[in-house]
Image (spheres, rainbow, N blue to C red):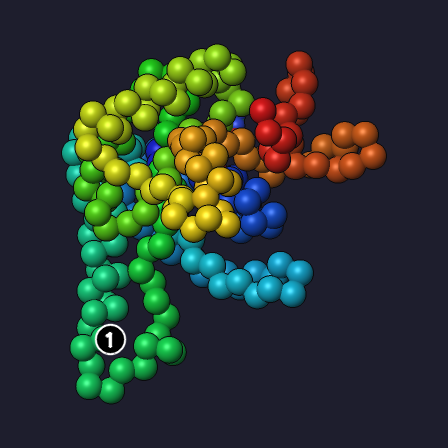
Amino acid sequence: MCIGETGLGKSTLMDSLFNTNFESSPSPHTLPTVKLKAHTYELQESNVRLKLTIVDTVGYGDQINKEDSFKAVVDYIDAQFENYLQEELKIKRSLSAYHDSRVHVCLYFICPTGHGLKSIDLVCMKKLDQKVNIIPIIAKADTISKTELQKFKSKIVAELQNNGVSVYQFPVDDESVSEVNASMNAHIPFAVVGSTDFVRVGNKTVRARQYPWGTVQCFEQF
Ligand code: GDP
């Protein structure tokens, strides 16, 4: 599930991550309520077939009264748990054939303001943190400088802690992955850049954003 204000780059990041074009149409800022839209895709990555459902929160944060923005999201997540429970309670269950629509991970897109989290972010994450794995990510990270980004990240981590919001932590109890997972945990919230454009750099064509002053490659660590 991708939660974040309209125009923060949710669809672009999904296209970038899965290296495809999900052909979503941009939504306007004028929707009266938040709507949850789920689309299921069958992807093929070399010889691995992946069934992926992306849930988008259309209209999130666009209403003048943002108080209920998160309600639609919470209701959606609860409804998926309820559906699963109903299937489990049946005398003749067919969980193997059941399309499990429970949300496994929620990418929470944070606006790259440099000024910490908005109240809507904290309230929404607090409502969800016991129901779903939340991975906070700073959207459009190319719009924020390197030093600002470090300060912004520390501020977000402090605000999450002070408000008792628990976000996903990569597990560090298994020795074989503890080192790499600990270093991943140190990066949270992740700073991301997405693009639907391809640019030629040297002899390679890479997913990137081109500006008058330079090119930002999406999969470069910076
Ligand atoms: P959504 O409404 O959250 O799905 O946002 P979109 O993916 O439709 O993106 C909205 C606009 O933001 C588009 O013009 C994108 O090109 C732009 N955008 C997306 N990702 C990035 C990014 O990482 N950096 C910058 N600067 N712009 C981005």
Closer-to-camera residue (134/177): 177
Give me the residue at 36% from left, 54% from top: 104
Quadrant of the frame with the C terminus: top right
Residue indicated by mark 1: 87
Among the 4 quarters of the image, the one containing residue 196 = top right
191 over 60 or under it: above or below:
above
Q: Under tag 1, what secondary structure?
A: helix
Relative to 222, 29 lies left or right = left
Q: How many marks?
A: 1
Give me the residue at 77% from left, 32% from top: 200
Residue sticking out furthest to the front: 175
Give me the residue at 78% from left, 37% from top: 204
User: In the rendered image, is residue 28 in sight?
Assistant: no
Is the shortest distance between ligand 1 and the CB of mark 1 under 8 Å?
no
Residue sticking out furthest to the right: 203
Closer-to-camera residue (120/173): 173
Q: Position of residue 191 (x, y in %)?
A: 47, 29
User: In the rendered image, is residue 85 in sight?
Assistant: yes
Closer-to-camera residue (40/126): 126
Relative to 169, 122 lies left or right = left
Relative to 194, 65 lies left or right = left
Q: Disc 1 residue type?
A: Glu
Q: Residues within 10 Å of mark 1 (few under 14, many from 20)?
A: some
